[in-house]
Amino acid sequence: MRFPAFDIRGLRAQMDRRFAVTFMLIVFAALAVIVTSIVLTALDRVASYANHLDEERSRETLVGAIETFKHQLGATLNDYAAWDDAADYIYVRRDADWVVRNFGDMTFESDLFDVAILLDAQGVASMAYSDGAPIEGPLTEYLTPDVAGLLEQVQTMPEGEMPQALGFTKTAKGIGAAGAALIRLKSGDVTVDADQRAYLIFMRHLSTDTVKRIGQAYVLPGLALSEVDPAISHRVDILSPTQATLGALGWDLRAPGDVSRAQVRWLVTSAVVLIGFYCVMLFVVGTKEVRRLRGDEAAAIKLSRTDRLSGLANREGLFSALAQRVEDARASGEDVVLLYLDLDGFKEVNDAYGHGTGDRLIRGVAAGLQMLVGEEALLARVGGDEFAIALSGTDVEARAIAISDAILQFFGEPLTVGERVVVIGCSIGLSVSPAGSVEGEEIIRRADMAMYSSKEGGRGRWTLYDPAMDEERESRNQLELDLREAIQRGEITVVYQPVVSSQHFALVSVEALARWHRRGHGPVSPDVFIPIAEASGLIDQLGMSVLRQALEQLRSWPDLRLSVNVSPGQFRDPAFVARVQAVFKETGIEPSRTVLEMTESYFIQSPDRARAALERLRQIGVRIALDDFGSGFSSVGYLRQFGFDRMKIDRSMVLALEEGHRAIETLQATVALARSLDIPVTAEGVETEQQAIMLRLAGCDELQGYLFGRPCGADEIEILRHKSMEPRARAAEQAFYAQAEKRHQA
């Protein structure tokens, strides 16, 4: 049998092919293993990076949330501290009840602050509230060294900088943001000396609910406040102003990379061919996660620039958007105009009906303004009752004036707030930036100044900024500085106007009046410097200076009595009575010889405090007169309630005597009313002898006016003391009856 011949060459070739196939299989297997390992390694690295990226993004978001939390407290603190009413009630009126209502009570269930403390310059607390109730126990649990450092920072802050400092601290309630600010006028001016200043402390603690809301708002699951654990990386430490670690906010890791890897792992193990698909899926998931984080960041930025109550842009949003409009205007050549609005009468509505009604009113006003200005305009709420509207274009000034007229017309109608109907007004200031030539902050300053000009001009109007306003403001500020120096140097002098008996025209009393001869300028009318003294807090020093000079002069006039006007600003000062008593002791004058004259406005505003102050004045022997009766509200109820020692009839009622019988009957009824209450009556503004006799016949026992003498120096009063006026009184009476007889015969 023959065997087939063995083909060694074919075998070798076949072996070569098998080897090649095997080799290729091994190579492909090795490549598959290597590629799979590379893909898995790459997938592990991508997953780890995604986890790290998510953690870093979350950390950045949380850092921003903490800063926003602190700055929101700062914005609230600035609104309350830089407040004209706060400066008035704390420095001038010293109204503790007002402080509790507007600071202490606001800590109850408030999202803005839960602790409010008012300190004087020595660090002594005059009010301390937490969660709507007075703080029990030592304040050291709240006035921590961190808070003391913030207060010291504010007290030593250079002139011109915002007197406010923020930081985090740890109190008895836990960790929270704290802020210290100087109580001042909205303009930034401080009307009292350093040792009389007051400082407001606000705190907003990171409670469980607050932390939960932050976690929900910034999409940070499981966000919680805890002690610092170095083993945990996904946390943000909360540092005090001295960089001490108070605690940490930590969140649950979402590990998006691990989730993604788990989703694609089974696909990688099934086929190497799908690795690219896996990468695409991972890229898609990663992109989606980054996009979501970017969206969260954008939402956080928008939230920080939005007013929570009205939904409009807030102050920060206004600054940012206005700066952008100005920059765009420079490129386009268009103009930018800003309308600055302040509601007239909002405080009265807020005080009368509560903050809930006030908040609803703000939301209603915001909605109404949105309808009026349209979508192209920027509308912002920049303060408690202040709004701003920014417009851009080529004819913006005309449009702004038209919108201003529409806004005034809108506020000319009563507004319905729930079941209440309220009436408020609006004062508007306008400022223009031609072609973006004026920066945003300067536009706001000018519009704010124009708005105050509208208020001073009678409210319910709009005013376009004029450079002369800066000069007027500077002139007024300089006038205030000169007045302060004049008081300190004793340059305020006193003149005296005679007050005579209605029977014999004999001098019985004098009224002390302040006069100021300004250095380098000449005499300044009291109608000018008295309001400035009241607005700047100088009225206490001015009033005491006049009283002291007048009492020292009264020593030379033992037969005369003295009348001195008292401003409501003086009367609101709790220390006023003690100061008056001290002046009487210094001068040695019997208090019963002095009458303090007060208008009825303060008695209407604060009847309880006024009654208490009157009782203290009467205890030291001072008598009280109701001045300018008949010029305003003139309530009979207040005459009965306060029991004044004298009533002064306003000169308008005296001048009205020329009008005939009705004015005479009104005068007689007024005097009869006073007499029925055992209140003697002085008539002011007497200029003719006929008026004097009519007033005497009506029952006025004392008369005052140019008929008997203008305000004059002490030497002229000395002459009048020794001059007999009885012949003049008899002659006036005879002339009066002679004229009456002629009229009767006619």
Image (tube, rainbow, N blue to C red):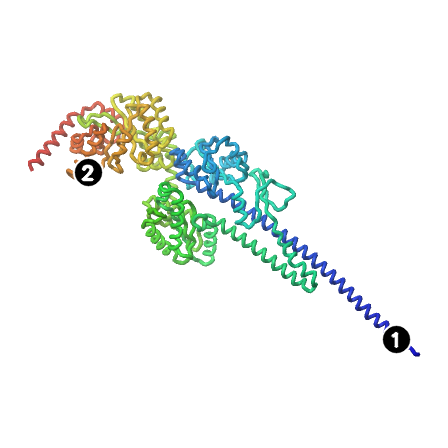
Residue positioned most to the bottom: 1
**Neighbour tally class for label 1: few under 14, some 14-19, many 20 plus, Cα within 10 Å:** few
Q: Which residue is mark 2?
A: 656
Residue 331: x and y, percent? 47, 57
Q: Is residue 109 visible?
A: yes
Q: Is residue 118 visible?
A: no
Compare residues 603 and 695 and report the one nearer the observer. 603
The numbered disc on residue 7 is: 1
Give the left or right position of residue 519, taking residue 732 as reference.
right
Answer above or below: position of 301 versus 238. below
* Quarter where residue 242 is shown: top right
Q: Amino acid at mark 2?
A: Ala
Compare residues 638 and 562 and report the one nearer the observer. 638
* Quarter where residue 485 is shown: top left
Answer above or below: position of 59 versus 689. below
Q: Amino acid at mark 1?
A: Asp
Image quadrant for the N terminus? bottom right
Tag 1's secondary structure? Answer: loop
Give the left or right position of residue 695, taking residue 144 as reference.
left
Residue 170: x and y, percent? 55, 37
Residue positioned most to the left: 745
Tag 2's secondary structure? Answer: helix
**Residues at circles 1 and 2 in contact by the CB criterion of under 8 Å:** no
Image quadrant for the C terminus? top left
The numbered disc on residue 744 is: none
Compare residues 460 and 355 and report the one nearer the observer. 355
Answer above or below: position of 429 versus 395. above
